[in-house]
Image (cartoon, rainbow, N blue to C red):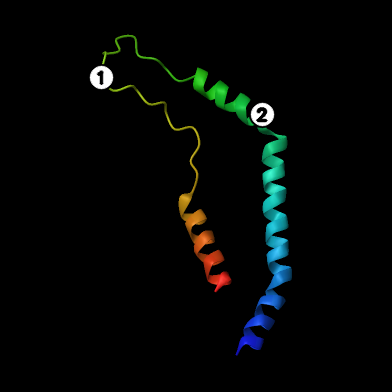
Amino acid sequence: MQHSRMAQKVSATPTWTQVYANVFQAIAAVLSNWHNVLRAINMASAKIPVPRDAEVTAEPDLPQTLVRIPIQQAEQAQAHAEEMKE
């Protein structure tokens, strides 16, 4: 039983190596273009209209959402990683 589980993990290693390589390439691409990302965020923030008759409220106004990060994919990836550990 343990031998077959070990064999499955060993056979899955090249697949996970490629997945990690792809993830690291994506991270490297974002980091190498980080100055462009910050510039785009700055440009988008500068174009947000400010109301002239803004009311003073006790709660601070939150900025508009500029980037949406799909959390569901991260949760699925984490669940999958935990399954692979077992």
Q: Nearer the viewer, residue 15 or 36?
A: 15
Task: Point out residue 10 in the picture as x, y percentages from the top left corner.
Answer: 71, 76
Position above or below: 64 against 23:
above
Front-lying residue, 66 or 83: 83
- CA gap, disc 2 to disc 1? 35 Å
Q: Give the mark toward the camera: 2 or 1.
A: 1
Left or right: 42 as drawn, with respect to 13: left
Q: Quadrant of residue 21?
A: bottom right
Locate residue 12, reporting x and y percent: 68, 74
Tell me the residue at 71%/71% (across/down): 13
The residue indicated by pointer 2 is: 36
Residue 86 image point, x, y percent: 54, 74
In what element is the residue under mark 1? loop
Please, what secondary structure does the residue beneath circle 2 have? helix
* Label 2 close to label 1 by CB (< 8 Å): no
Residue pointed to by mark 1: 58
Residue at 66% of width from left, 32% of height from top? 34
Q: Amino acid at mark 1?
A: Ala
Outermost residue toward the front in this view: 2
User: Based on the displayed image, in which of its 4 quarters is residue 3 positioned?
Assistant: bottom right
Figure check: 18 above or below 12: above
Task: Report whether 43 appears left or right of 61.
Answer: right
> Where the N terminus falls, by quadrant?
bottom right
Residue drawn 44% across the image and 33% down it = 65
Q: Residues within 10 Å of mark 1 (few under 14, many from 20)?
A: few
Image location (x, y in percent) of residue 33 = 70, 34
Disc 2 marks which amino acid? Asn
When the figure is inspected, residue 62 is found, relative to residue 80, above or below; the finding is above
| First in sequence: mark 2 vs mark 1 | 2
Q: Residue at x 67, y 39 (%)?
A: 30
